[in-house]
């Protein structure tokens, strides 16, 4: 199956798609640092990046007529800053709003399916009408906004089309949901909205995959069976965070336990005790400090959301907090694991630039889970 990746960043979403067996016909990213990271890993032979046709290009200027094969899936994460909780909240007015060109790609390539990812802030109340506008445009990508229309007038026209009895043009069945990466085997609490659409002529019925991991199961592993602590060889006196009242679970939860920071990085050496080159991208960075609202990620919980600062790395967001209260910054390698990138994937820029790239990335595991579900339905439709 053929795919096109838009706004690829360093390739987290694209890697998840490729791991499910899709072959990228184009991988498009404008940021030169992100492209350098992808090229560096291609030179290293990192799978599945080796054969990617990378285009260092602005999607707004990309000619989709150059793609000559039928496309089964378009995927991408349009820049999130216009809708981010930590951004300037300009939404549709922000020049970085790339949803219009994501919709253009759907209109011109007519893929069998698409998958777009963005920050949870896109679904909040202040953007609710514009979010509905995005979904409506994706349902009817051929109904283009007229020169004299503002976006609300265009939305009204799309709504009238949606309520018609019949429509003969290009139409997609579109659903959207906020997913938390930690519920799908990523050791990080990272909420993102996914928008998935299938071309209506395929007759596909689809829903988002169910969570595979849960907080309840982690609680049971810690405080009912003690398996979590035993697995990590943590003595009873160092098992901190014990609830005053332990709820006895008579039955094992269906889901697996949430993964914690300790689960993810415990086999890595202490970066302060080892030379920086003993493990790739695992050098210590000094200066971590706690301040209100930014207290780091506890070792025995899933990490808080890794973020990419507008003017550098947000110091309090990307820290590890030990049970004794001490703090340090996550290394690039640790952050890559929290984003479920493979250890063979390397970063070539500064710590700040590498952390910014990771803060903007889609966790590879989450991308793979959603893509696998989409591919299953496409294969059934083909048969």
Image: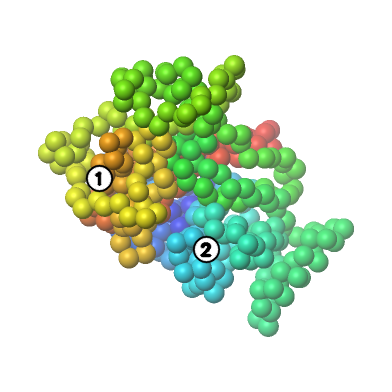
Badge 2 density bin: few <14, some 14–19, many ≥20, Cα 10 Å: many
Q: Quick one: 185 or 108, which is closer to the camera?
A: 185
Q: Position of residue 309 (x, y in %)?
A: 36, 60
**Mark 1 vs 2, N-terminal side:** 2
Q: Mark 1, mark 2: which one is toward the viewer?
A: 1
Please tell me which residue is depicted at 61% across the width and 34% down the height of the picture.
210
Q: Position of residue 92 (x, y in %)?
A: 56, 70
Q: Quick one: 104 or 268, which is closer to the camera?
A: 268
Q: Which residue is mark 1?
A: 328
| Furthest-front residue in this view | 244
Query: In the figure, is residue 341 to the left or right of 258?
Result: left
Q: Please state, as top left, top right, bottom left or bottom right, where the C terminus lies in the image.
A: top right
The residue tagged with tag 2: helix, strand or loop? loop
Residue 309 lies, with reference to residue 111, above or below; the image says: below
Q: Which mark is residue 83?
A: 2
Please tell me which residue is depicted at 49% across the width and 60% down the height of the picture.
85
Q: Is residue 320 among what the camera can see? A: yes
């Amino acid at each position: 199956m053929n795919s096109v990746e838009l706004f690829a960043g360093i390739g987290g979403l694209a890697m998840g798609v490729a791991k499910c067996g899709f072959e990228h016909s184009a991988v498009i990213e404008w940021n030169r640092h992100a492209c350098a990271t992808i090229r560096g890993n291609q030179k290293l032979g990192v799978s599945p990046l080796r054969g990617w046709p990378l285009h260092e290009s602005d999607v707004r200027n990309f000619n989709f007529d150059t793609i000559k094969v039928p496309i089964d899936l378009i995927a991408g994460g349009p820049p999130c800053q216009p809708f981010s909780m930590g951004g300037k909240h300009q939404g549709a007015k922000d020049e970085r709003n790339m949803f219009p060109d994501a919709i253009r790609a759907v209109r011109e390539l007519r893929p069998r399916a698409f998958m777009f990812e963005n920050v949870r802030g896109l679904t909040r109340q202040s953007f609710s009408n514009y979010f509905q506008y995005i979904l409506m445009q994706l349902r009817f990508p051929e109904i283009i906004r007229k020169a004299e229309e503002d976006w609300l007038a265009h939305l009204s026209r799309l709504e009238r089309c949606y309520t018609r009895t019949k429509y003969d043009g290009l139409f997609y069945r579109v659903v959207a949901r906020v997913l938390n990466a930690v519920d799908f085997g990523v050791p990080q609490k990272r909420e993102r909205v996914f928008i998935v659409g299938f071309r209506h002529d395929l007759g596909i019925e689809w829903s988002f995959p169910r969570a595979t991991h849960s907080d309840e199961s982690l609680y049971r592993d810690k405080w009912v069976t003690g398996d979590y602590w035993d697995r990590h060889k943590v003595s009873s006196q160092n098992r901190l965070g014990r609830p005053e009242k332990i709820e006895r679970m008579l039955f094992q939860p269906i889901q697996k336990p949430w993964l914690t920071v300790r689960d993810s990085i415990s086999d890595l050496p202490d970066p302060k005790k080892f030379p920086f080159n003993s493990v790739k991208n695992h050098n210590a960075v000094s200066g971590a400090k706690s301040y209100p609202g930014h207290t780091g990620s506890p070792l025995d919980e899933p990490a808080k959301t890794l973020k990419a600062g507008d003017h550098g790395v947000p110091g309090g967001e990307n820290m590890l907090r030990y049970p004794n209260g001490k703090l340090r910054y996550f290394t690039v390698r640790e952050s890559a694991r929290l984003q479920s990138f493979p250890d063979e994937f390397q970063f070539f820029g500064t710590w700040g630039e590498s952390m910014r790239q990771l803060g903007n990335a889609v966790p590879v595991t989450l991308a793979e889970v959603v893509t696998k579900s989409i591919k299953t339905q496409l294969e059934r439709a083909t048969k």
